[in-house]
Amino acid sequence: MSWRRLELAALCAYALGFYLVVIRKSLRLSHDYSGRLYGLRAGSLAGHLNDLSDAQWRNFRGNLPVLTIVMGAFLMLANMLRYCYSLKGRGASLVWLLLSVTYLCYLHGACVSFILLIALINYSIVKVLEVAYLSIEHMFVDVHNKHMQRCQVCYSGKTCYFALQERALIGDKYTLLTYLCYLTYAPLYIAGPIVSYNAFAAQLDAPQKNYSVAQISWYGVRWILSFLLMEAMTHFFHYNAFVVSRLWQQLSPFEIFIISYGVLNFMWLKFFLIWRYFRFWSLVGGVETPENMPRCINNCHDLESFWKSWHASFNRWLVRYLYIPLGGAQRKLLSIWVVFTFVAVWHDLEWKLISWAWLTCLFFVPEILVKSLSNKFQPRSALGLFIHRELSAIAGAVTISCLMVANLVGYVVGPSGIKLLMSRMLGKDALPVLAFIFISFYVGVKKTQVIPFDETSPTSREVAICRPRQLAAPHHAVACANLGSRAAWTAKRRCRHPQEKQPQRIVAPRRCARTSVATSVRSAAEVIDSEERQQQPTPLWPAGATRRRRLQETIAANSACCGTAPVCKNIDLPRRGFQLRGTLSAATAADRPACASNHPAEDAELPLNRKRTFEIHSHHHE
């Protein structure tokens, strides 16, 4: 057994012991203090009391039956009218607006008039001050509608949503009717993920096709399972009730840590359920939105990844409308203070939220500096890699501790309780507890480093079906055409290498769509990443000068030979790396429709020397 496997086994054993200790202690605390905790209600699981001390979760859970009835009625009427009368654009906007305003009248009563008045004033201001300036040297941004994202990244939904968000709409799409429909859209009005106007308006004409009916159904089943997990958690672990009752002040340092850790996980699961419920509603209605909570809170070991993985749609909105206008990465140390202060005020004007924002920025500054220094350090020797991994794990453990403190101040104890919390956790009797906390977080971060990217995993095999041996010529990375969703057909795909006389035949899977990376291939950036990984014993992928130079050469070659590549009107999805029947040629690219043919066998295959590199922006056709 190798050293890496022994290390992984030891880390997993420690993690298992950690959770067993935390669960056992949590059960005992909840049982011993059940008579002194506020917010407990009669439960339905084995006679245990249910922790409903959190007002937000209590209201959502109590109104869930009514909300589900409203969701069913809204979807039935909206989808039936949309498909029966083939409503698109303004027709779909009008139907959604009428249904959404009816929903808002039920929620707000006559006060809905104030919401519509504010929306009209904002629309009028935008139309009156409709002035923009764009330098001629930046005009290429409007027409350069390709991207170099890898297919497994696109599988997460990020790339496809960015394509909807960044693509400009024609003038008649920016209407008052569509604007009001966007603001009042019922599934996203209360707490749904934030979606940009362009992405929303683009889906009025064509409902989303990135998620099939089976995938949306499984999405709903996963939500139900997560809801059952939340019910079990609130029945057996009364974390939030300890905070509301302020009994945490009477606990030992180790018990305070367990309650704090449990409260953060409770908060994560609460927002996970609320946001995904409304996103499920939106997906059934035909509108795809960004996914909030794409990563579990226990898998975030730095502030940057935590913020991107918490309220992810809001993070994208902040980056687009606040962070980049403030200077972006060039002024990161200053702009984060403005951004997080705005986030605190956006939630509510409370001193504890302001304290949370400033504490987060205070902890964020050292992380930014350390990351900038670590990016300049490229370890080559085994000793250098070992030191780099150990320092990264230590820094991750410190960052998680700071992250817990900031969130506890903002959402649990408040600024008034931070002094008591620090005095209890920094006392002499708390030193063993602090050591236990640090070691536990260190093990958590180290576990993410020890587990490498497995080339033999199913996902890896699906992505790397055809891997060129070298990046020698631009004609070596030809496009993968859209294979459609026909039930059963196979195509002969040929993966030619520069020094191979006989092509390597690969049987194509059933479909080539965003929902399956089985037919995806590695882009030029992935090939370079793969070659660099073969030279390094760890999955650290530094963006060195060689990688940037080779990638720039590939992009330049692609742009030179496929500057007029066809673009699908829906969602751009690059698929490259195969030479197959159905590959578009330079001579026929102008005559092709927006999306590639669903029958690649009908297209003539060109000789190798006439192949061109295309980046097909394709969409899955049902």
Image: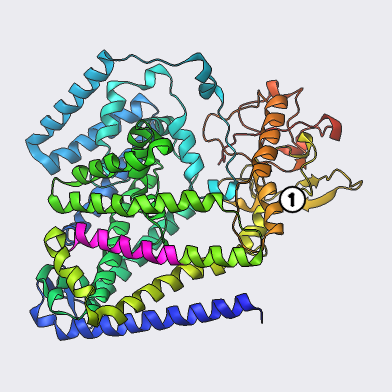
Q: Amino acid at mark 1?
A: Arg
* Residue 521 appears in the figure: no
Question: The C terminus appears in which quarter of the rendering?
Answer: top right
Q: Quadrant of residue 188?
A: top left
Work out whether residue 274 or residue 561 is closer to the camera in this orientation and state it.
561
Judged left or right of residue 365, residue 180 is left
Q: Name the quarter where the N terminus is drawn.
A: bottom right
Asked if residue 476 is among those painted magenta in the image, a careful observer would answer no
Q: Quadrant of residue 400?
A: bottom left
Q: Could you say whether the residue bearing mark 1 is in a helix, strand or loop?
A: loop
- Main secondary-structure element of the magenta-colored stretch: helix
| Displayed quadrant of residue 575 | top right
Residue 379 visible in the picture:
yes
Q: Is residue 10 above or below residue 345?
A: below
Task: Residue at 62% x, 67% y: name it.
Answer: 383
Q: Nearer the viewer, residue 30 or 284?
A: 30
Mark 1 surroundings within 10 Å by alpha-carbon count, few (fewer than 14), some (14 through 19), many (20 or more) = some
- Residue situated in front as seen by the camera: 279 or 35: 35
- Does the magenta-highlighted stretch encompass residue 398? yes
Residue drawn at 51 percent across, 32 percent down:
570
- Which residue is the site of mark 1? 467
Where is residue 580 shown, x and y percent of the image?
77, 41
**Seen in the image, is 555 located left or right of residue 602?**
left
| Residue 68 % position (x, y) | 25, 54
The segment highlighted magenta reads 394-412
Query: Is 96 or 327 nearer to us in this picture?
Result: 327
Q: Position of residue 48 (x, y in %)?
A: 19, 81
Residue 418 locus on image (x, y percent)? 17, 64
